[in-house]
Image (spheres, rainbow, N blue to C red):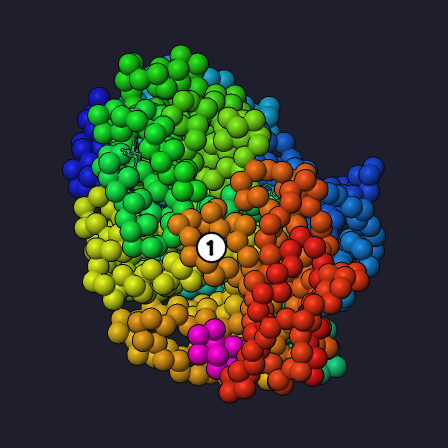
């Protein structure tokens, strides 16, 4: 009984501390608090030597993989090693227990289908094993100590287990509630001791009284257990954190491995952390980076603490090479980073006096298997493509979703929604989506409305859609425990809940109070949940899936107990980091089904995993109205983008606290140039619609939104490109300029596609900001407002009066834009296009344009226009490389605007391709700024055409 009271007291404390989620740093585990993390981190390189049994290694009959046995020489535990060749310079390496006493969980949900395996050739020589993938990639498997070296063109790029930190603790099965060992030798399995089982709770009680959790010797002693078994026995299975007991019924069964990147001293990725883009060294001080999806209240900046989502994907970059690695594991994971050097070796004649950089990583997960994908690059874009081929490309969102979003916790009633929507028109600010947070529901019961306040939801939605606008409503994964609530009842009746360790339905606290949580890991539960989105009055709203880490206010670290149970007896610890992703998959499916697979869904999620880009957008959660939070947005969003999660944004203004007008204005400007642009605020903050600030600030916010809308054709084309290739929308400078080492540590400016350089102003009262222009001196960067041109490889102080957004178009690019101001983006989707062309030194530029109906999924059947644009030798051409099938675009060319143009033409003519009649066009040449403007070419963008500029 005691432990129950203690637990209860703890829950109350948690709830009293804060109405939201009560968190300070002490509520979250450090590596020392997570026993497995501490253990792996303290491993010495000679603690566990492994040997690959060379004779055991065989190739699969298909020739696409090899497998063999790796033995832990200290414990005699045997591991199964598998190495697979994957198409497009990718290698998959798996390490699992050879004969686990319980199947270890392998994550499949992250993968976009089965990888495309290709032949991998094996040669055994000099007691080593060589694996060849294609002509240039080879892996050397060293047997003892076991190590894998990865080479490309004879250059060593990566080493696995070079520090001997490989460890897979065997899964064990706890008989009843008594802690007993099941040896890795199955014949040792002890019988269940019924009497012992009754002692289970006493044991826990003891633990809470004394803080100790010794295992009773006589219950566990195996006389013939080898020495290392003694060692294991010393570690109790149960673990307690802040009064929450984790029973760990399968014992400590963590995994870990070190991976070194040779010749690299820059690592990026493993979002989500509120930290710099370039990963810091964690070895010397502080904790490793943590990946464990958590609802962190008022998160801190510049540290490796876990946040809402997890993508265990890392990029190593140098001037010569870019490499990626995906650690496909959904359990709590910690990653230690260390930048060191290593002797170059090989050059025996000169000794090893020369050294090269080396980036060491140590990956530690609480359970599951080691399942690694190595992406050999060699360029950043190759790594993006290789990784997103495995975990899926980002989906193409509906056009409206890339416009401006207006949210707050909460818009009070339907009249409030109507008024805000009308005010956007009154103040001439484009807006595409209105949002409703939790208060629209009947007592936080999702899929219901607070009827007095929202009496006519259908009409409210229609009032928005009439203007091309949409409504998003929140839908969280916790369901109020209330027998009169149909979702809850159904959930319970169908037995679809996540279970607690004792087998009953798990009950946790969240917004509605006591709640149950669907087991989204179960496909049948996802199907059931998907149906809910078809409900009348909900079927025309888009969705915001929040709190899906999942957030449990009275749970350990504000989430679920790790020994909760999912389908097939899976433990929550095995699937924790994909719970949110599974939730969103069900929502996505529900959105498709309710409109007969005709319409594109829009879903925003807070929790995510590798692959979530297939279904949703992500925002960076509960940030704060603080300049430092504005500043951290760029690195956080960049980190997500290079990890495949491209449709991302940070709440404008900061969720907590009140931004002043200047911060709000600067935040609007910054958000106009990130993929997802949403204004959102906590219920305790002042209202912050743009017109509530002084007039000058309001104009700045309005201009920022309008600036965003002028670039929507460019954004939309980038989204299409991301869908085709997995390329990020927002790119670190080094992504486009991989050899420019000045950029490797930069994350306060970035690129959109390959064409726009953005430097958001994130300092209060900044009169100027320093901008670095990447690339060599052949690069030109055209200031889109002042028209000044900056050379690559230089720095400049740019004046930043409040109106100024420092944005520069790269010489050599063509950007499609739209300049007519409309209420919403969908109303403008047929509006004419202006081509903004920035020339390079050779007077060349190129770009592309994607057009479709913006709403349906007909683009998947080829109903879209894709045109390639090129200006060269004074000839501007549009070639429609993908003509549409049924979709007939009305979009025409309104204007061509060329900066860096060197002479005044004698004439400009247009003709349709291949050989239409030539028509003269009006033009204007600004000699001072070297800008040529060509007026009203008037051609339809669904067809090919050419504009001839005569010297
Ligand atoms: C693009 O996104 C759609 C969903 O919008 C998806 O079905 C398709 O597979 C994606 N394309 C690629 C090449 O991944
Ligand atoms: C819909 O718009 C009409 C006309 O502006 C307005 O009178 C009505 O109250 C609106 N309905 C809702 C539910 O907001
Ligand atoms: C377009 O420009 C990029 C960057 O300058 C260049 O790499 C590419 O080859 C060009 N493509 C065409 C078709 O000219």
Q: Position of residue 226 (x, y in %)?
A: 54, 36
Q: Is residue 842 visible?
A: no
Would you say 904 lies left or right of 120 here? left
Q: Pointer 1: what residue?
A: 675
In the image, residue 318 above or below residue 245: below
**Nearest the camera: 154 or 234?**
154
- Residue at 64 percent across and 45 percent down: it is 888
In the image, residue 238 above or below residue 87: above
Judge whether residue 785 is colored magenta. yes
- Residue at 51 percent across and 23 percent down: it is 527
**Nearest the camera: 151 or 239?**
151
- Residue at 41 percent across and 38 percent down: it is 466
Q: Is residue 831 visible?
A: yes
Would you call the spot at circle 1 few (<14 residues within 10 Å), some (14-19), or many (20 or more)?
many
* Furthest-left residue in this view: 16
Give the extent of the magenta segment: 780-789
Quarter holding the N terminus is top left
């Amino acid at each position: 009984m005691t432990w129950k009271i203690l637990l209860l007291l703890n829950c109350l404390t948690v709830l009293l501390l804060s109405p939201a989620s009560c968190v300070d740093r002490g509520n979250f585990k450090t590596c020392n608090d997570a026993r497995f993390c501490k253990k792996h981190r303290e491993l010495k390189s000679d603690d566990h030597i492994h040997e690959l049994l060379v004779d055991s290694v065989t190739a699969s009959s298909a020739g696409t993989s090899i497998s063999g046995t790796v033995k832990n020489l200290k414990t005699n535990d045997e591991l199964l090693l598998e190495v697979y060749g994957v198409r497009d310079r990718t290698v998959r390496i798996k390490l699992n227990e050879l004969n686990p006493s319980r199947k270890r969980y392998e994550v499949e949900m992250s993968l976009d289908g089965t990888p495309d395996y290709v032949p991998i050739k094996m040669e055994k020589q000099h007691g080593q094993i060589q694996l060849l993938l294609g002509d240039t990639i080879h892996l050397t498997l060293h047997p003892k100590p076991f190590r894998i070296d990865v080479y490309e063109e004879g250059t060593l790029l990566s080493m696995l287990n070079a520090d001997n930190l490989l460890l897979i603790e065997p899964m064990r099965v706890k008989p009843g509630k008594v802690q007993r060992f099941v040896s890795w030798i199955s014949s040792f399995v002890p019988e269940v001791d019924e009497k012992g089982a009754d002692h289970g709770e006493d044991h826990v009680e003891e633990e809470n009284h004394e803080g100790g959790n010794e295992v009773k010797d006589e219950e566990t002693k195996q006389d013939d257990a080898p020495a290392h078994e003694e060692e294991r026995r010393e570690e109790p299975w149960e673990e307690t954190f802040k009064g929450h007991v984790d029973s760990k019924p399968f014992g400590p069964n963590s995994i870990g491995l070190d991976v070194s990147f040779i010749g690299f001293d820059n690592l990026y990725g493993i979002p989500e952390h509120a930290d710099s883009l370039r990963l810091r060294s964690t070895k010397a001080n502080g904790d490793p980076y943590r990946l464990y999806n958590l609802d962190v209240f008022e998160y801190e900046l510049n540290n490796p603490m876990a946040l809402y989502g997890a993508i265990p994907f890392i990029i190593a970059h140098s001037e010569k090479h870019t490499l990626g690695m995906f650690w496909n594991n959904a359990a709590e994971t910690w990653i230690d980073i260390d930048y060191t050097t290593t002797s170059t070796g090989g050059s025996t004649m000169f000794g090893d006096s020369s050294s090269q950089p080396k980036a060491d990583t140590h990956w530690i997960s609480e359970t599951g298997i080691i399942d690694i994908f190595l992406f050999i690059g060699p360029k950043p874009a190759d790594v993006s493509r290789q990784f997103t081929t495995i975990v899926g490309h980002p989906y193409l969102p509906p056009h409206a979703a890339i416009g401006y979003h207006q949210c707050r916790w909460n818009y009070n009633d339907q009249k409030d929604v109507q008024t805000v929507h009308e005010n956007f028109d009154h103040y001439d600010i484009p807006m595409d989506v209105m949002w409703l947070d939790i208060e629209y529901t009947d007592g936080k019961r999702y899929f219901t409305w607070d009827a007095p306040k929202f009496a006519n939801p259908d009409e409210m939605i229609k009032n928005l859609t009439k203007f091309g606008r949409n409504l998003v409503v929140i839908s969280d994964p916790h369901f109020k425990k209330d027998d009169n609530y149909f979702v809850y009842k159904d959930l319970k009746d169908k037995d679809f809940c996540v279970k607690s360790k004792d087998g009953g339905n798990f009950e946790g606290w969240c917004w509605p109070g006591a709640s149950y949580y669907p087991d989204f890991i179960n496909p049948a539960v996802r199907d059931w949940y998907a149906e809910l989105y078809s409900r009348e009055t909900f079927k025309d709203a888009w969705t915001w899936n929040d709190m899906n880490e999942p957030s449990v206010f009275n749970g350990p670290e504000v989430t679920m107990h790790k020994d909760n149970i999912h389908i097939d007896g899976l433990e929550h610890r095995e699937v924790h980091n994909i719970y949110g992703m599974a939730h969103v998959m069900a929502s996505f499916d529900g959105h498709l089904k309710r409109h007969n697979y005709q319409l594109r869904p829009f879903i925003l999620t807070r929790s995510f995993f590798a692959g979530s880009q297939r279904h949703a957008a992500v925002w960076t959660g509960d940030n704060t109205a603080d300049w430092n939070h504005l500043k951290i947005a760029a690195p956080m969003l960049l980190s997500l983008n290079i990890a495949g999660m491209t449709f991302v944004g940070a709440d404008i203004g900061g969720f907590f606290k009140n931004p002043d007008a200047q911060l709000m204005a600067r935040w609007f400007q910054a958000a106009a140039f990130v993929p997802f642009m949403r204004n959102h605020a906590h219920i305790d903050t002042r209202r912050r619609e743009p017109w509530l600030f002084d007039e000058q600030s309001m104009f700045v916010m309005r201009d920022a939104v309008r600036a965003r809308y002028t670039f929507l054709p460019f954004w939309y084309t980038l989204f299409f490109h991301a869908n085709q290739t997995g390329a990020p929308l927002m790119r670190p400078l080094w992504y486009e300029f991989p050899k420019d080492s000045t950029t490797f540590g930069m994350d306060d400016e970035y690129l959109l596609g390959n064409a726009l350089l953005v430097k958001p102003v994130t300092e209060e009262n900044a009169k100027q900001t320093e901008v670095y222009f990447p690339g060599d001196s052949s690069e030109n960067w055209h200031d889109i407002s002042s028209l000044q041109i900056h050379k690559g490889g230089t720095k400049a102080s740019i004046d930043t009066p409040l109106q100024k957004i420092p944005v520069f178009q790269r010489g050599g690019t063509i950007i499609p834009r739209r300049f007519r101001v409309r209420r919403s983006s969908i109303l403008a989707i047929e509006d004419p296009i202006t081509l903004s062309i920035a020339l390079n030194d050779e007077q060349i530029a190129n770009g592309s344009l994607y057009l479709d109906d913006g709403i349906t999924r007909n683009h998947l059947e080829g109903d879209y226009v894709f045109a390639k644009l090129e200006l060269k030798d004074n000839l501007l051409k549009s070639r429609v490389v993908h003509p549409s099938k049924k979709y007939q675009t009305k979009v025409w060319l309104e204007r061509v605007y060329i900066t860096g143009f060197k002479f005044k033409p004698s004439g400009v003519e247009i003709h349709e391709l291949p050989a239409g009649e030539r028509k003269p066009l009006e033009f204007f040449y600004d000699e001072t700024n070297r800008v040529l403007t060509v007026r009203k070419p008037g051609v339809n963008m669904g067809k090919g055409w050419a504009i001839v500029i005569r010297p």
